[in-house]
Image: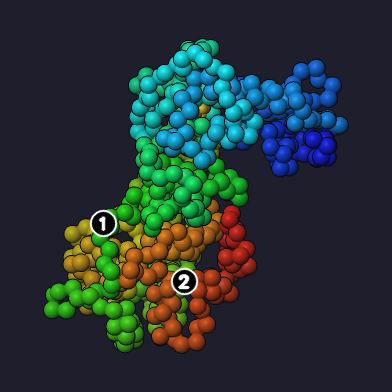
Amino acid sequence: MPTLKIDDKEITVEPGASVLQAALANGIEIPHYCWHPALSVAGSCRLCLVEIEGSPKLQLSCATEARDGMIVRTQTESVKDARKSMLEFFLINHPLDCPICDKAGECLLQDYTWKYGTSHSRMVEDKRERPTKDLGGNILLYRNRCVLCSRCVRFYQEVVGDPYLFIEHRGYHSDISIFPGKGLTHKMTGNIVEICPVGCLIDKDFLFHARVWNLQRSKSVCPGCSSGCTIYLEHKDRRVFRIRNRENPAIGQQWICDDGRYLYHRYENLNRPESPWTRQAGELKPQTWEQAMIYAVEALQKNPGRLAAIGSAFASCEENYLMRKIFRQILGCEYLSFYAPAIEEADTVYRSGFTIRGDKSPNRKGAGLLLGDQTDFYQAIESGRITRLFLINGDPLLHLTLEQKRILAKLQELWVLDIQSPEWDSVAAHFWPIACFTETQGTFVNAVGQVQRFQRALQPPQGVRPGWEVLLDLLARLAPGAGMLSAADVLDALAMEEPAWRSISYFKLGDQGLPIESR
Ligand code: SF4
Ligand code: SF4
Ligand code: FES
């Protein structure tokens, strides 16, 4: 493996790595725009210039392979001078509109100008003004801010495999443009906003909604499909403002799709009761959690042979495990299964291998491993095998058909734990409001068997509790001494019982998760 010196620091790198990669991997910053780890090398922005001993001119660190014995300097006067000149060049026509730019606070033009540029401009000529273009979908192109790094163009060519954008004209007139007849309604489009190093590509969904430095970040997992992409929920004032990609090398994931990026809107404006309710003389009467629990503990212990428990591919592993523990181990219930939506479309695989799954549930694999095969519980209700049902959902898009409602109405008693109640108002006997994925924590198992942890970002609304906490409360009342107090304890108990989860804990899962042990 080649060993080189960068700024007197001895560095050994993988063969084939560039000088820029070697520096970045070892904490040495070299400013760059056009280079991106997931894209080909363009060598166009000229910002990553460094001095290499023996070379008469400055070299592009992104396009120069790190070689054994190389001596590289990133802080000499000529390097600093070249950076200053390039930054001055990028700002010739830039409107310097940081105060109203969404990218401010995370913009590489702002950061590099501050660190490596000059504090004043020598330009006295008028700036060129280009109107903002609407590229379709959620994307606006603030053309005056572009540094022509071509990341967005290469993203479509190399990651998606379908060119949507190109650089129109040449030289001073160069401009990002979209191929005629194409609007940016593509499912991968939001990624170009993330990789644009400046405030040129802007997402209408976030435009002028918040300043990025006011947002808090929580690590989560997208529940939009069984790919289980790792994400950041960015939030403030008990509201999610945007979802960003959180790269996970363990599953080779570098992007997220737009279904996942904007999915937080599904959880806004839901009809969420602020306490459990029960049906009395045909009316839905609010209850305290204590009243709901006292009644359930007594009622659930009656006639367990006809009682069934249905977990969910939208519930965490912890919740599905607690469902199994309560209903199979404590109450001796025979019928256990889980809800998952029908798979109605094929997987979409892009050129880079990034996959949007046809399975639109985040935890089908985890629910299946814990609760057995998915069975048709509607049929079991019709046949009289099930007369009472305890069900957890969590899918904000669940829609019960009239036929399903007709069958559920046959039950003597139906408990539902869900994030919203309208679908259940006409059929449930008891409704317990639980937190949605942004308000709780837990783990999902994705389609390739990676167990990944999602963390709580928001407080649930008043009166709403995380599903695992509600189930743990129920378990503690039915079988005191279970010894679990937190979601982490539940995962530990699961790992003790289930060989596939052996050696998995919140601590060991870290940010990237761990593969489930195949049986
Ligand atoms: S729009 Fe952004 S990503 Fe595309 S070339 Fe311009 S600066 Fe680069
Ligand atoms: S591919 Fe699936 S998991 Fe990934 S961001 Fe899209 S919807 Fe979410
Ligand atoms: S990062 Fe090297 S030329 Fe742009």
Q: Position of residue 508 (x, y in %)?
A: 62, 63
Mark drawn on residue 321: 2
For marks 1 and 2, give the CA distance: 25 Å
When asked about the image quadrant of residue 211, the answer is top left
When asked about the image quadrant of residue 324, the answer is bottom left
Q: Position of residue 67 (x, y in %)?
A: 81, 30
Q: Residues within 10 Å of mark 2 (few under 14, many from 20)?
A: many
Name the image quarter holding the C terminus.
Answer: bottom right
* Label 1 or label 2, whichever comes before in sequence order: 2
Mark drawn on residue 399: 1
Q: Residues within 10 Å of mark 1 (few under 14, many from 20)?
A: few
- Between residue 234 and residue 449, name the one nearer to us: 234
When asked about the image quadrant of residue 510, the answer is bottom right
Would residue 102 appear left or right of 115 to someone viewing this image?
A: left
Would residue 217 appear left or right of 131 to someone viewing this image?
A: right
The amino acid pointed to by label 1 is His
Would residue 251 appear left or right of 63 to someone viewing this image?
A: left
